[in-house]
Amino acid sequence: MIWTTRPRSDQGGFACIKEGEGPRVLLLHGVGLQADAWAAQLPDLASHFQVIAPDMPGHGQSAYLAGRADLSAYSYTVAQLLEGPTVVAGHSMGAMIALDIAARHPELVAGVAALNAIYRRSDAAKQAVLNRAESLGSETGPNPEPTLERWFGTEPSEARSACEAWLRGADLHGYRTAYDVFAREDGPSDRALMSLKCPAFFMTGSLEPNSTPAMSQAMAALTPKGQVHVIEDAAHMMPMTHHEEVTRALMAFVTECHS
């Protein structure tokens, strides 16, 4: 699988990959990446649905977030892309935003899929991510090596190379802003999870140390229509490293939501 840069169109101030026709699916990537991180999922989803994958604010070809930066600001801005019932799927910080949108705009969300989502980090994990956010203030450009090693180890791969290119090319202000929000959040509130009216799908990898299977299982248990799926031998970048299983599971969920 090779991750190439797809053409973008402007939609609501976002640079978006937009493919397919039919019921809508919105795909939200994580910090430091861009919409092409969903390249493996796009063909199958676009064969049945209209798929919109934006570069998140301050990422790729999209403008910075206007005004104060917090999770609700990201959610409010991204929600402008919703037109009628949409399945919203997010990875990592994108999962945070997807769950927040589902709680705030239930009339617009037909289903929500949270891939590698965090929920109640351990004290050690919380401190590690806060330290990382703090260190970004002294960097003159994103240093991708520690992140790549956490995600992929040291073995070369097409997925690793694609992420390295995106991280090295990331806008530092956009990256810092998003990562600071990501670091200071601790997952959706229990009240928000219990209030979700739409189907909610939580998916992560068995080897994921930061968005653990236990986190996904706990969130699914609180959600009235929660489902959980753990991919064996997968870690944080499973939409790229285990794209076939992720695509199958996501395709089945979106089809269920839009049936």
Image: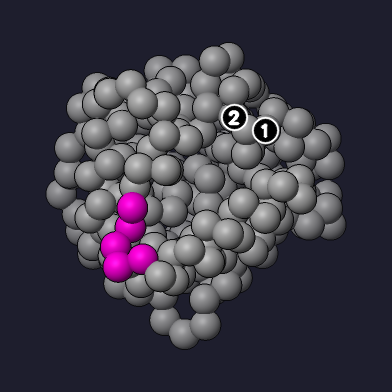
Image quadrant of residue 212?
top right
Q: Is residue 140 magenta?
A: yes
Relative to 184, does residue 36 appear above or below in the rendering? above
Image label count: 2
- Residue found 43% across the figure and 20% down from its top: 242
Picture coordinates of residue 68 (x, y %)? Answer: 52, 82
Q: Is residue 96 magenta?
A: no
Q: Are marks 2 and 1 in contact (CB under 8 Å)?
A: yes
**For mark 1, does the 10 Å Cα neighbourhood hold few (<14), some (14 to 19), or many (20 or more) residues?**
many
Kind of residue at disc 2:
Glu
- Residue found 62% across the figure and 39% down from its top: 210
Picture coordinates of residue 235 (x, y %)? Answer: 53, 27
Picture coordinates of residue 81 (x, y %)? Answer: 42, 62
Q: Secondary structure at mark 1?
A: loop
Q: Which residue is mark 1?
A: 212
Q: Which residue is mark 2?
A: 208
Give the residues in magenta. 139-143
- Rendered-image quadrant of the C terminus: top right
**For mark 2, does the 10 Å Cα neighbourhood hold few (<14), some (14 to 19), or many (20 or more) residues?**
many
Kind of residue at disc 1:
Thr
User: Is 141 or 106 nearer to us in this picture?
Assistant: 141
**Image check: 26 left or right of 172?**
right
